[in-house]
Amino acid sequence: MSTPEIMNDPLMKASVWTEYGPPEVMQLREVEKPTPKDDEVLIRIHATTATAGDCEQRSMKMPFWYRLPLQAYIGLRRPVRITVLGMDFSGKIEAAGKDIRLFAVGDQVFGSSGIKFSANAEYICLPEEPAEGALGIKPANMSYEEAAAVPVGGLEALSFLRQGNLQRGEKILINGAGGTIGPFAVQLAKYFGAEVTAVESTEKLEMLHSIGADHLVDYTQEDLTENGATYDFILDVISKSPFSGSIDSLNPNGRYLIANPGLSHMVRKQWFRLIGSLPGQQDNKKVIFGAAKPNNENLNTLKELIEAGKIKPVIDRIYPLEQTAAAHRYVETGRKKGQVVIKMNHDTNSKQ
């Protein structure tokens, strides 16, 4: 049950999303602290992240056909329904509703808030089994900062590899291997017994080699689909690999998964289905549109693999909450290796 002393202070600090636009629209403000419902826990967040997805939401720099329904939901002229970004988090449960059974006050947890966002703040309330996110006990061998770098990237990587039915001994190419999702995809693919080729810019290749990539392709120097190599599975994390070239680079029965498909991908997939059904054209190649749905079970799988030393997060930089705008600016350079973490400063904060 919630304890009175925890609920006394009604305010918390959060990086508030005030407008659609550049990183400067993220402003540190005091806002109302959430109160847990009977089926929710109140989590004091110790660390969260800034991702490319957060930056895309903030700026609304996306195709019109996708942006319009988002703004209709969030707020046409400015953010209203969602005013705090961030999905990854780690922290400690400070209060629990009367219907909570899986967690207790004092548990150290990590997870994803999903499309609710709201994690770039000192507190968040979530059900113990979020409909669009995930919540689990933090890995014992991780700091809060390390744990916060896991959920979104790890859950999406695990989901995409399962969707593509990656098998031991297969060859996989991962395009965009150095960001939020890619490092986990590299490590999980190695754990599943695959031979991994990672595609990235020059400055990220050493990191990818250090976490197990067997082969490296510098996309600034060569076209990933023109070197004659073929693969059983191509995972395009950034959705920028050449469509026809990727299809040609698949082995028979190969799978090409596009993590964030655009309208052009949808059209090309239908065309591929058409020509693939013609006589003499069938080789069972598949085009898959990635759809990751986080859940507690998959998050616990990641926890077990982390505690067993099989996977780990890659953290590039750590910023304090008041520098969330700077974190967004760095993410938008495209130079980040792995995750950019945002750390709360509870030790010196008046809201201990």
Image: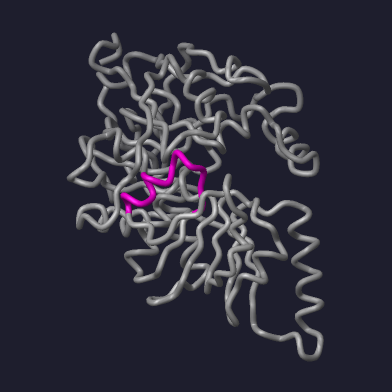
Query: In the image, is residue 296 part of the stretch drawn in magenta?
Result: no
Q: Is residue 352 left or right of residue 130?
A: left
The image shows residue 115 at horizontal and vertical percentages of 55, 41
Q: Furthest-bottom residue in view?
A: 279
Q: Is residue 187 left or right of residue 234?
A: left
Query: In the image, is residue 200 part of the stretch drawn in magenta?
Result: yes
The image shows residue 94 at horizontal and vertical percentages of 27, 30
- Residue sitting at x 42%, y 32%: 340
Q: Compared with residue 100, is residue 118 higher up or lower down, i.e. above or below? A: above
The quadrant of the image that shows the N terminus is top left
Q: Colour scheme in the image?
A: one colour
Q: Main secondary structure of the magenta part?
A: helix
- Residue sitting at x 64%, y 77%: 285
Q: Compared with residue 182, is residue 16 higher up or lower down, i.e. above or below? A: above
Q: Compared with residue 310, is residue 54 higher up or lower down, i.e. above or below? A: above
The image shows residue 273 at horizontal and vertical percentages of 76, 75
The quadrant of the image that shows the C terminus is top left
Comparing 302 with 39, the one in front is 302
- Residue sitting at x 72%, y 65%: 244
Q: Which residues are magenta?
A: 199-211
Q: Quadrant of residue 346?
A: top left
The image shows residue 250 at horizontal and vertical percentages of 60, 73
